[in-house]
């Protein structure tokens, strides 16, 4: 009787050990397959994460334009045109102090809001007015988006399949600003003057086990003005020389 009990115990132990080994083998195999597939699919995940991060930073730049630049913008204070006695523009002056002030205010607004989101302090920003579908429960954890694993297969049926990868970001350094003026021809003898500020935002995009760097430039129009010049009068002759021959009138 004792031998039978011992035999059954040994058999049960062997069965449990085999089941345990099989379960561990399956778990290890699935983990290895998941890790190998993830390595192949990570470029897709990172590109999607960068796209979501850039979408957020674009929304914050637009918010800064509306809340700072449009409120403080006064065209006459930024571009001053000096005219001659005959009413023709002779020179153009830029108010660099005002331009720099507005640009720095916009850059500071974007930087502050990005830091709030990075740290999960969403009560400091009006995220519901950004025009994006954001989950406040994720934002409070510093997560701006969750990428379903199935998104990498580009298949609608598998889009929500598998675990979700959280997307976070870290701002790298300060937001750089560059201001330039552009002059281009506009119509006949008119000049179109543009003052444009470019904000450069550099961020480290983070998903589990992988990171990538995102650097994006955003152009913000500070001022646009058209300066009218003299329109020359031309006489187009219809003679024997050439139908396209043009003589300026004196």
Image: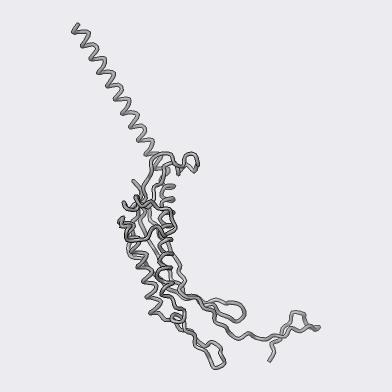
In the picture, measured across the screen, residue 32 lies left or right of residue 159, that is left
Q: Is residue 26 above or below residue 246?
A: above
**Where's the N terminus, which quadrant?**
top left
Q: Position of residue 127 (x, y in %)?
A: 38, 58
Question: Residue sitting at 39 percent across and 74 percent down?
Answer: 102
Q: Residue furthest left?
A: 2
State the image quarter where residue 203 is shown.
Answer: bottom left
**Which residue is at 36% across, 32% downward?**
29
Q: Percent from the top left, x then y, of residue 129?
A: 41, 60
Q: Is residue 43 above or below residue 230?
A: above
Q: Is residue 188 left or right of residue 180?
A: right
Task: Give the x, y percent position of residue 61.
Answer: 41, 64
Q: Residue at x 74, y 82 (%)?
A: 245
Looking at the image, which residue sits at the far right?
Answer: 240
Q: Relative to residue 194, is residue 22 drawn left or right? A: left
Q: Residue furthest bottom?
A: 85
Q: Residue furthest top?
A: 1
Front-lying residue, 220 or 25: 220
Split into 4 quadrants, where in the image is the C terminus?
Answer: bottom right
User: Does 194 appear above or below 169?
Assistant: below
Q: Which is nearer the eye, 55 or 154?
A: 55
Identify the image's colour scheme: rainbow, by chain, secondary structure or one colour: one colour
User: Which quarter of the figure has residue 65?
Assistant: bottom left
């Amino acid at each position: 009787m004792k031998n039978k009990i011992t035999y059954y115990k040994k058999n049960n132990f062997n069965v449990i050990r085999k089941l345990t080994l099989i379960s561990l083998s399956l778990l290890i195999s699935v983990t290895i397959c998941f890790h190998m597939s993830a390595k192949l699919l990570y470029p897709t995940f990172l590109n999607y994460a960068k796209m979501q991060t850039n979408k957020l930073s674009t929304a914050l730049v637009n918010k800064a334009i509306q809340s700072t630049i449009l409120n403080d913008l006064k065209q006459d204070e930024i571009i001053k045109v000096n005219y001659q006695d005959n009413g023709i523009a002779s020179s153009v002056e830029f108010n660099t102090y005002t331009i720099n002030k507005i640009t720095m205010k916009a850059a500071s607004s974007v930087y502050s809001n990005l830091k709030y989101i990075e740290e999960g302090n969403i009560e400091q920003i009006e995220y519901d007015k950004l025009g994006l579908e954001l989950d406040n429960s994720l934002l409070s954890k510093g997560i701006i988006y969750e990428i379903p694993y199935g998104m990498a297969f580009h298949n609608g049926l598998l889009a929500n399949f598998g675990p979700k990868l959280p997307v976070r970001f870290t701002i790298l350094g300060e937001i750089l600003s560059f201001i330039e003026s552009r002059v281009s021809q506009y119509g006949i003898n008119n000049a179109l003057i543009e003052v444009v500020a470019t904000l450069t935002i550099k961020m480290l995009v983070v998903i589990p086990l992988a990171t990538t760097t995102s650097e994006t430039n955003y152009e913000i129009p500070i001022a646009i003005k058209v300066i009218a010049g003299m329109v020359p009068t031309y006489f187009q002759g219809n003679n024997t020389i050439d139908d396209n021959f043009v003589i300026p009138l004196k």
